[in-house]
Amino acid sequence: MEVGEVRVAMDSDFMKLRDLCEEIDGWKVEYNKNGISVHTKHNDISDFKMVKIRSVMNYSAQTVYDVLHDPEYRKVWDHSMKESYEIGYLNPNNDIGYYSLKCPSPMKNRDFVLQRSWLDTGPHLYILNHSVNHEDLPPRKGIVRGISYLTGYWLKVLTPKSCEFNYVTQADPKGKLPKWLVNRATHIVAPKTVKLVQKACKGYDSWKAKNNPNQKPWIYPEQIKVPRINLEDPKILPMDHAQSMDSLDESELKESDMSQSELSELNAGENGDI
């Protein structure tokens, strides 16, 4: 789907994600250690490279799928998340929501308005998103509105207790970022994310047993509580109504401008000990 396009995802959209995960031509290996590989690829859409991650997880694809979906559990393990919620759904497998993330001070935080789509075919499970624009989610003062051209997960069942984990993202946080920070995001933060998801999977079943164990609206649509969004809703706006922060220049920020705790968080796992 194109940025700003609001419609129910089709099988071809999920297949596009799968094709990107399996694609070889044009991708450069940036990291390959401890069973985690990170590849990047230049593109004509943005100055920021597309990033692709692959790993094998010793957890069922359904567990990983639930961990990535569960909004309450995400508050437990996703420490970069500042705020996340849905405002409505198109159908039981497509919704529109808001996600904001913390950036190292003194950088400005980023946020995204996203249409999220998902599909469980049994042996293959998919979650993908792209940026849209909605009147009820206007840009916020002091936060830079980023763009997700395509971000998604493809989980491939290997055994009842293991799966292949694939993640692809083509996103633009807008503005100009320091090269050293972009480099860390590729070589450290990306593989660290896989480890965070693995750790989250380890604790999910025990956590879920104590926190609304039967509440899984991504599986049981009758549990969806947000209102339905009509595709003709005038509140769905073109992307050119969204705030543009391309002129924001944070490229001169140095590591010394960051707090020691934030640097430690960014650098964790630099030697593979994530």
Image (tube, rainbow, N blue to C red):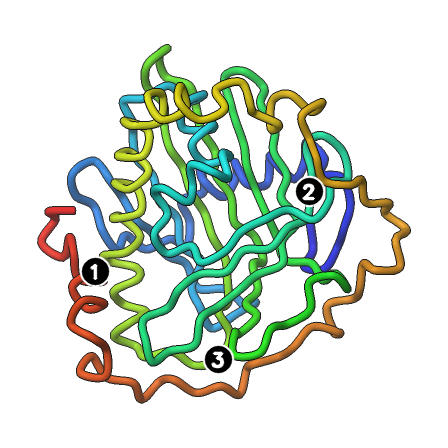
Are discs 2 and 1 less than 8 Å apart at CB?
no
Q: Residue at x 20, y 45 (%)?
A: 32
Residue at coordinates 53% horizontally, 88% vertically from top-left? 247
In the image, 113 versus 3, the foreground residue is 113
What amino acid type should be assigned to the residue bearing mark 2?
Asp
Q: Is residue 133 left or right of residue 218?
A: right
Q: Which mark is residue 175?
A: 3
Q: Name the amino acid, label 3.
A: Gly
As drawn, 135 above or below 257: above
Q: Nearer the viewer, mark 1 or mark 3?
A: 1
Q: CA distance from mark 1 to mark 3?
A: 22 Å
Query: Distance from label 2 to label 1 (Cα)?
Result: 32 Å
**Which callout, 3 or 2, points at the residue further toward the start of the chain?**
2
Q: Toward which corner of the image does residue 250 lie, by quadrant?
A: bottom left
Measuring from the top left, give residue 199's x and y in whole percent.
26, 34
Binning the other alpha carbons within 10 Å of mark 3 as few (below 14), some (14 to 19) or many (20 upward) gives: some
Find disc 1 in the rendering and name its residue: 265
Element type where label 2 sits in the image: strand
Q: Is the residue marked by circle 2 packed among few (<14), some (14-19), or many (20+) residues within 10 Å? A: many
